[in-house]
Amino acid sequence: MSNSSSFNEFLLLAFADTRELQLLHFSLFLGIYLAALLGNGLIIITVACDRRLHTPMFFFLLNLSVLDLGSISTTVPKSMISSLMSTRAISYSGCAAQVFLFFFSAGVECSLLTVMAYDRYVAICRPLHYSTVMGSRACVRMAAAAWASGFLNALLHTANTFSVTFCQGNTLDQFFCEIPQILKISCTDSYIREVDLLVVTVCLFFGCFVFIVLSYVQIFTVVLRIPSEQGQHKVLSMCLPHLVVVSLYISTGMFAYLKPSSVFSPSLDLVLAVLYAVVPPAVNPLIYSMRNKELRDALKKLIQLVLKK
């Protein structure tokens, strides 16, 4: 293949070759996808309908749930269809769309997780300034900035990636169109710009991660000074779920993009991709709802209201 115009599709990595395993993969991904749709959908409806949850923390959680619905819908349905139909092909435009939507989701999610950490920091460490710092206008601006930065990030990566020349076939060692796998089939002298941009993006993600960690160091320092054990438990129940989500999402994603080429393994890449692209959107609703009493109570009230009708 001499260049990108010589083919109109890519071949994705199949999870399995036998029909039984393909159906197993389809069933597992279908279960995860339905769980993500149900969990995130319930959070969106509950937060939107219950006025008591119209606070900055739940506003950003609402944004995160909307984003997670789009994020998991970018990769999982196509992988399910591929297994069900025993096909590995994805169109050139479909691949470009996956790259754009995946990086858009990744950029927005990292920004939202950072803003959510800042929200918890202000609420716990600067409670007297909370209403001023996290006012409704400020929250809307932060959310808008997160979505805008994700769009710009995705646009730059997609344009750079698909402007390179491909000369090593059209087979990708991943179940969705991932930039490192696409760069592997490009000519070595044509992707330096995209590699540089990837490094800058990973550094920004690392910066977000450092900011989040520092925020939680200060939060936990304040929490340990709370004399009441019940008060400590309440604060930790709000913060620990967010920390779990951040650790899972950012650590696996950064390792996947920064690991040395000598560590290359299709199986490892596949597991990492599932951990940062499929698992977080599915487990986020479970983590947040189980550890947040206000959300649990509002969800129970909503379910009871629906059942009465």
Image: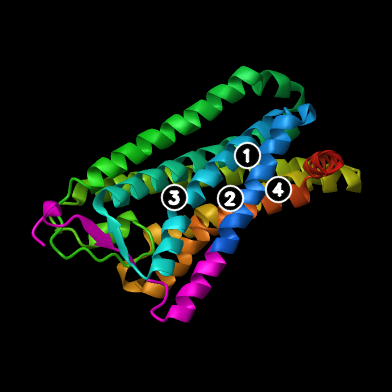
| Marks 3 and 4, the one that precedes in the sequence | 3
- In this picture, residue 227 sits left or right of residue 287: right
Look at 51% across and 38% down and name the residue there: 111
**Residue flagged by tag 4: what amino acid is it?**
Tyr
Residue nearer the viewer, 36 or 252: 36
Look at 19% across and 55% down and name the residue there: 8
Residue occupied by mark 2: 246
Determine the CA span between mark 3 and mark 4. 22 Å
Secondary element type, mark 3: helix
Foreground mark, 3 or 2, reads: 3
What segment carries the magenta color?
A: 1-29
In the rendered image, residue 161, in percent from the top left (x then y), is placed at: 24, 48
Foreground mark, 3 or 4, reads: 3
Foreground mark, 3 or 1, reads: 3
Residue occupied by mark 4: 288
Residue occupied by mark 3: 74
Residue occupied by mark 1: 117
**Residue flagged by tag 2: what amino acid is it?**
Val
Local crowd at mark 1 within 10 Å, few (<14), some, or many (≥20)?
many
Tell me if residue 120 can be seen.
no
Magenta segment: does it hold 28? yes
**Residue flagged by tag 3: what amino acid is it?**
Thr
